[in-house]
Amino acid sequence: MAGTRPVFYVSDGTGITAETIGHSLLTQFTETRFVTDRIPFVDSVERAREVGAKIREAAQTHGVRPIVINSCMDGEVGAALAESGALMLDVFAPFIEPLERELEETRERRIGKAHGIADFETYHRRINAMNFALTHDDGQSIDYDEADLILVAVSRAGKTPTCVYLALHYGVRAANYPLTEEDLEHDRLPPRLRPYRDKLFGLTIDPVRLQQIRQERRPNSRYAQFDTCKREVAAAEMMFRAERIATLSTTHTSIEEIASKVLTTLGIHRVMF
């Protein structure tokens, strides 16, 4: 198992923060294979020692020192985890002391604050945005008056997951419209989209990748044929150019990157939850 390193994201809450930061760090190292495990709700010394035993077992299995990316707020819990002998990376440690000095305030050790329901109004905005995304998925509803943005693309180019991500993480009411064969016969926007032109953002994708995705969904169908994919993508891109619609390829772009580009381009300013 040379070149494999066990990594544990350990938290006294959901573990989302530790995993998000940890993943961003680990992607910078390409020669090592990481085996990761998220362990949430480690909120007592006893639980920390149980997790420590698991970490030591991983060290024996892989023959290398594990890495623990830790977002536990309790110092005693962190100390108990450190008894495992792993490399301990505290998510908050580099920032807390400088912030306390600057703000002249001592932090409150509150568990689960980052992903808890601290503001019910904000939380309900997220839920409403999610419901909006699902209701307006793939052109199910074309009442776009309340939409913050509308993603336009051929089928399976990444519209739905991007809309869900925008709703869940930013509370953005994102709809999506799938371009049909009838729509693609023209190089102009479909009539139902024209009143909302300032809300539109186009997604495109490499035809080879699109064919692979469609083949998984509907094997050996006309829908999944390469010629179909190539023709649809070319027609969609021609429409976007003719209408001067901002466009991004999703072929090698993560949902996080797509969402950031869409929000920036359309001038939508929202704080991530």
Image (cartoon, rainbow, N blue to C red):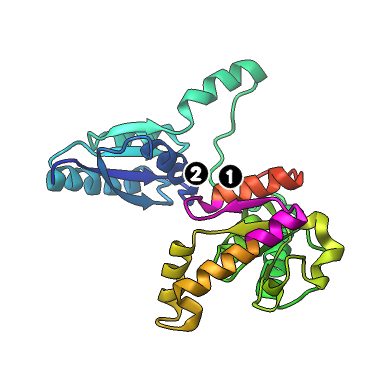
> Where is 260 relative to 173, above or below?
above
Q: Which residue is mark 1?
A: 114
| Mark 1, secondary structure of its residue | loop
Q: What residue appears at the point 81 percent right and 59 percent down from the top-left corner?
A: 197
Q: Nearer the viewer, residue 98 or 238?
A: 238
Residue 2, image x and y in percent? 13, 42
Residue 70 visible in the picture: yes
Q: Which residue is mark 2?
A: 17
| Mark 2, secondary structure of its residue | helix
The residue segment tinted magenta is 237-255
Q: Residues within 10 Å of mark 1 (few under 14, many from 20)?
A: few
Q: Nearer the viewer, residue 77 or 116?
A: 116
Number of residue marks? 2
Residue type at the position of mark 2: Thr
Q: CA distance from mark 1 to mark 2?
A: 8 Å
Residue 106, image x and y in percent? 60, 24
Residue 115 visible in the picture: no
Label 1 vs 2, first from the N-terminus: 2
Residue 201, image x and y in percent? 70, 56
Q: Residues within 10 Å of mark 2 (few under 14, many from 20)?
A: many
Q: What residue appears at the point 45 percent right and 36 percent down from the top-left corner?
A: 74
- Disc 1, disc 2: CB below 8 Å? yes
Q: Is residue 54 magenta?
A: no
Give the side of residue 138 with respect to residue 146, left or right: left
Q: Nearer the viewer, residue 207 or 257?
A: 207
Q: Splitting the image into 4 quarters, where does residue 133 fall?
A: bottom right
Residue type at the position of mark 1: Ala
Q: What residue appears at the point 53 percent right and 25 percent down from the top-left corner?
A: 96
Q: What residue appears at the point 74 percent right and 43 percent down from the top-left corner?
A: 269
Give the side of residue 261 with respect to residue 197, left or right: left
